[in-house]
Amino acid sequence: MTRKQYFLSGLKDGMPICFGYFAVSFAFGIQAAGIGLSVFEASVLSALNVTSAGQFAALAIIASGTSLIELAFTQLIINLRYFLMSCALSQKLSPSLPLGHRLGIAYGMTDEIFAVSVSQREPLSPFYSYGLIAVAIPGWVLGTALGAAAGNILPAVLTNALGIAIYGMFIAIILPPAKENRVVAGVVVLSMVLSALFTYLPVLCNISSGFRIIIITLITAGGAALLFPIPDEPAEPEKEMPHES
C-alpha cells in the first residue's frame, strides 16, 4: 500500500473514534466553561493533552487553584498507561522509522487509537496513524470548543444535565471488565470507598483534589498489582518451516 492508501485507511478507521470523542469532549467543554475557562483555553487544553481522564481531573485542580507541580504530578500518575501503550506499539514499528515519525505517532497515543493501531499488521505505517489522528483529534477538540461555547450560552439546568455524560462514559468503561474479573471489581469498589473517605472524613477532606487522586491511584492500583499480579504468558515456540525438497 502507498502512503496515501495507509492515510485514507486510517481516516476511515478513525471516524467511529471521532464521533465517540465528540460526545465525551462536549461534556468536558461544558465543565471547562463551568470553572471559567474560555472556549479558546478549553480547546487548547484538549489539543495539547488529548486525555479524557487527565483533563477532567485537571479541571478540579485548576478550579481549586492548587500548584502547577501538583497538577503535573497528577497527570503523570493518571497517564502512566500511555508509556506502556507506547512501548507495546513501538514493537510494531519498523526499527528504521525516524524519530520524527515516532513522536508524531506518540502525540495521538490514546486508548482508542492504540487499540485500533495495535490490531494492524506489522510493520505499522506512520501514515495510518496520521490518518487516525487527523480525524479523531479534531473531533475531540471540536467537541470541546462547542461544549465550552454551549456552557456559556445554555441555561445551567441543561448544561448540568449534559455534564453528567462523562460519568456515563466512565461507568461504561469499568462495568464490562468488573463483571468479568473480581479483582477489577474490587479495585473499583475500593476506589469508591476511599474517594468517599477522602471527601467526608475530617482530616482527609483537607487534602487537595490532585493529591487525593494520586494517593487513591497508588493505593488501589499499586495494591492490586502487588497482591494480584498478572503472570507472564510463556512465549509460544517458533514452528520450524518445512524444508523444500
Image: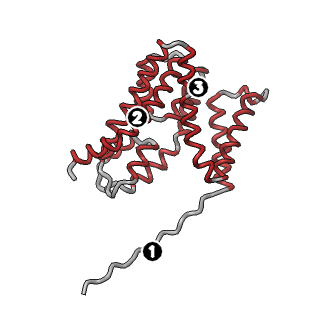
Q: Is residue 130 something one can see in this rendering?
A: no
Q: Nearer the viewer, mark 1 or mark 2?
A: 2
Label 3 vs label 2, nearer the camera:
2
SS assignment at label 3: helix
- Circle 3 Cα neighbour tier, 10 Å, few/some/many (<14 / 14–19 / ≥20): many
Looking at the image, which is closer to me, 28 or 103? 28
Q: Position of residue 199 (x, y in %)?
A: 72, 29
Residue at point 49%, 50% (across, down):
84
Q: Quadrant of residue 46?
A: top left
Q: Are marks 1 and 2 in contact (CB under 8 Å)?
A: no
Query: Which element type, helix, strand or loop, lies under badge 1?
Result: loop
Judging from the image, what secondary structure is the residue with disc 2 in?
Answer: helix
- The quarter holding residue 139 reads top left
Residue marked by disc 2: 19
Q: Earlier in the sequence, mark 3 or mark 2?
A: 2
Per the image, the residue denoted by label 3 is 61
From the image, tell me which residue sits under label 1: 237
Foreground of the two, 51 or 212 = 51
State the CA–CA distance, disc 3 to disc 2. 28 Å
Q: Quadrant of the C terminus?
A: bottom left
Residue farthest to the bottom, as pictured: 245
Dot 3 amino acid type:
Ile
